[in-house]
Amino acid sequence: RASPLPLQVVRRQKLLGFNAVRLPFSFKDFDVAPRSFVHRSCPLPSDEEVAASVTPPGASVRGPAPRLPNPPPASSYAGDVCNAYLPATSVRDRLVYIVKFYIENGFVVMLDNHLREDQTALENPEKWLAQWTSLAKDLLADPLVRENLIIDLLNEPDNYGVSWQTLTGLYISAMDSIDSAVGGNVMFAVEGTGQSGLNANWGDGFATERVEELGLQDPKPFFNTLLTKPYRERVILAPHVYPASVTLNDAGTTGNALYDRLDLSFGGKSKDGYCNGNECQVFPIAIGEFGSRLEEARDITMMNDFSNYMTDPKHRFSWFWWSWQANSGDTGGLVDDGTC
């Protein structure tokens, strides 16, 4: 049975216990003409059916499922009409609606500009800066959004060979502009780059020690500049960590080898922090992506070890699983292929 989006997706995610979601988007899509996602002949699932859809096979259904605290008006999706509540004015308006819809229903949202689909940051940095500033200003005008939005500035920069030197300029200019435009009190997330010598995944790469020894790009200039900024305590490190079936690299993926490389990259910065010789800054960590189809023994071993690392009392990192739908071929999704 077809489900009206995002109503039933968000409802199922909330029923499964999730309290945060990472939303990738492309600025280039803002230039695409909007289209309607209204469908007919897609009757709403009953509360009992929703409860069954989030219950493990063989377990008793504790239905009916509760409704979302802030659903769209019933008149906009009643009967056999789905998605009539989604804005059709522009792609940008629809993204703003989705972000607010999640937050109004109890989620933290990490909003992520996805470099693979959108190279605006590299092709036209000034346009990218203006677009991020404008979007953030519109979103953060809502006090509830301001408290629950994390701006993940650029996804997996090493996917396009972006150096730490270039990335520092992009990150600092964007955070300066957004923070000034919205009057502070906004949370940022940053991803690393240029540290394959550490076996770091795309999006990881924050090591500031053993840089020359391992042939790593050096993020110290970024951290040194960041420590001079008023938003320094509102910056989250958001590395991505994947198993061998995704990275095609078995090095440093399990046990102490895994722990050592994660500590060197970002784990140590959540305990002792980054020190510039005069002061230190401890950084919160949110694993921006990790995931697997969990079909290979080496992945299962890695995921068990990584889970232990994340939940260790000295860490207790936040995390985002990649992904909900199976639109990432190497990881699959939390829901079956072809479903929402």
Image: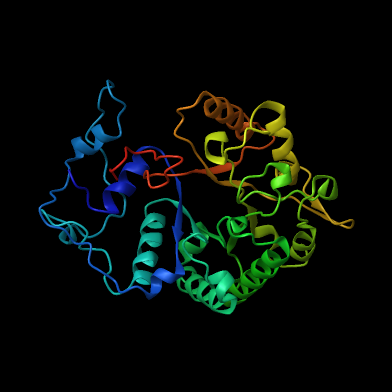
Q: Residue furthest right?
A: 277
Decide if residue 209 is in sight here.
no
Which sits in the foreground, 227 or 217?
217
The quadrant in which the C terminus is found is top left
Q: With respect to residue 51, does 134 lie above or below?
A: below
Residue 52: x %, y % from top left: 24, 32
Tell which of 28 and 319 is nearer to you: 28
Image position, residue 34 (x, y; %): 29, 71
Q: Residue at x 43, y 51 (%)?
A: 107
Between 25 and 135, the one lying in front of the other is 25
Give the image location of residue 266, x and y in percent. 70, 45
**In the visual, does 278 lie left or right of 58?**
right
Q: How has the structure been colored for display?
A: rainbow
Query: Residue placed at 61% from the left, 71% from the top?
Result: 174
State the residue at coordinates (32%, 73%): 90
**Residue 171 visible here:** yes
Q: Is residue 174 above or below residue 272?
A: below
Question: Based on the displayed image, in which of its 4 quarters is residue 100 positioned?
Answer: bottom left
Q: Residue placed farthest to the front in the image?
A: 248
How many discs appear?
A: 0
Considering the image in quadrants, where does the N terminus appear?
top left
193 or 60: nearer the eye?
193
Up-down relation of residue 132 to residue 162 (above or below) = below
Q: Residue at x 11, y 53 (%)?
A: 80
